[in-house]
Amino acid sequence: MPTKINATTEPVSVPPNSRLSGKRALVTGGSDGIGLAIAEAFAREGAELYLVGRSTERLARAQKYLEGAEVKIIAVDLSTDAGIDSVVRQIGEFEKPLDIVVNNAAVAYFSPFDSVTIDQFQHSFALNVAAPYFLTQRLLPFLTQPGGSVINISSYFADKMIPNRPSTLYSLSKGAINSLTKSLAYELGKRGIRVNAIAPGTVDTAMRRASIENLPAEAQAELQRFVDRSYPLGRIGQVSDIGGIAVYLASNEASWTSGGIFSINGGLTAG
Ligand SMILES: NC(=O)c1ccc[n+]([C@@H]2O[C@H](COP(=O)([O-])OP(=O)(O)OC[C@H]3O[C@@H](n4cnc5c(N)ncnc54)[C@H](OP(=O)(O)O)[C@@H]3O)[C@@H](O)[C@H]2O)c1
């Protein structure tokens, strides 16, 4: 099942005049983890959703999880040019403008610098950097102008390193996303499109669990000690911690907010 988000299993129901009523949002990596939590937060504020991921089965589960909301699913591999093209073609076929694009799907290789392979490097950059770049570029003709909102999911790893987590490749890709966020905000501002990034701290998702499960016990223990002493709020994040800022950035309340990198991390980067 998708990572559990809220205690409620109630179908999504939306009060009239909610913050995203009438808006359409595309969320990459929307079938699980942070992407699904953002999708749920958007749905509860009245947005229609397009969820993108590789597995049709996982997307269908997410669609069922979001029962009551208007959700379409698009199964493609975004690390390929054909995958990006397929999303753009399908969005074009729906013949409705898009208001929000969330570039969330990513891969995290935590390999030591001297063992990173070219394949890992190319995959990381294809999914974490090229996909947000070219997907946003090719969706521009469908994006509401003025008024569109692009939200890139970055990470604290863009500029903060931690013990036992060799992160050159992941950090490089997230640094690139931060740079893209600012340069694109500058360029698209003239069209009334806002571009922002959310940089979460560690969040309990499948990606996080997959990246620690093969670590030696002592490295896992050291990571836990790092969490205990480094998060002023005393815990890592849950996916539900990320939805609120995403709703704000997607909504008209953020109409003068662009080019920002928003750290949501329990205070991790305060010290
Ligand atoms: N978890 C954390 O601690 C953390 C912290 C900071 C930032 N982030 C960032 O938050 C974002 C989401 O992370 P997460 O932990 O929520 O990940 P996750 O639980 O592993 O979910 C990843 C999502 O992306 C999809 N996906 C993966 N590869 C794809 C591909 N090639 N094409 C299309 N979709 C693909 C997955 O579905 P399929 O597998 O079916 O494709 C899934 O829906 C990432 O940008 C990550 O870097 C995470």
Image (spheres, helix red, strand yellow):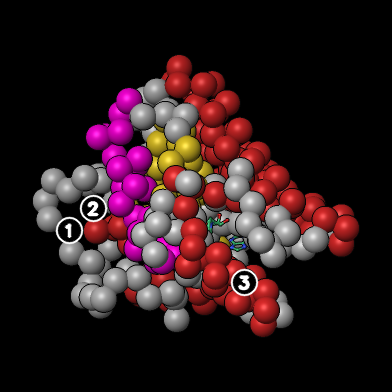
Q: Is residue 164 left or right of residue 147?
A: right
The majority secondary structure of the magenta stretch comes to helix
| Marks 1 and 2, the one that precedes in the sequence | 1
**Image quarter of residue 216:** bottom right
Q: Position of residue 185 (x, y in %)?
A: 50, 27
Q: Residues within 10 Å of mark 3 (few under 14, many from 20)?
A: few
Q: Which residue is depicted at the point 42% across and 29% down?
A: 258
Which one is in front in this view, the residue at disc 2 or the one at disc 3? 3
Q: Secondary structure at mark 2?
A: loop
| Marks 1 and 3, the one that precedes in the sequence | 1
Q: Which residues are magenta?
A: 235-256
Q: Are marks 1 and 3 in contact (CB under 8 Å)?
A: no
- Which three-letter amino acid code belongs to the residue tagged 1? Val
The residue that mark 3 highlights is 222
The quadrant of the picture occupied by the N terminus is bottom left
Q: Are marks 1 and 2 in contact (CB under 8 Å)?
A: yes
The residue that mark 2 highlights is 45
Q: Residues within 10 Å of mark 2 (few under 14, many from 20)?
A: many
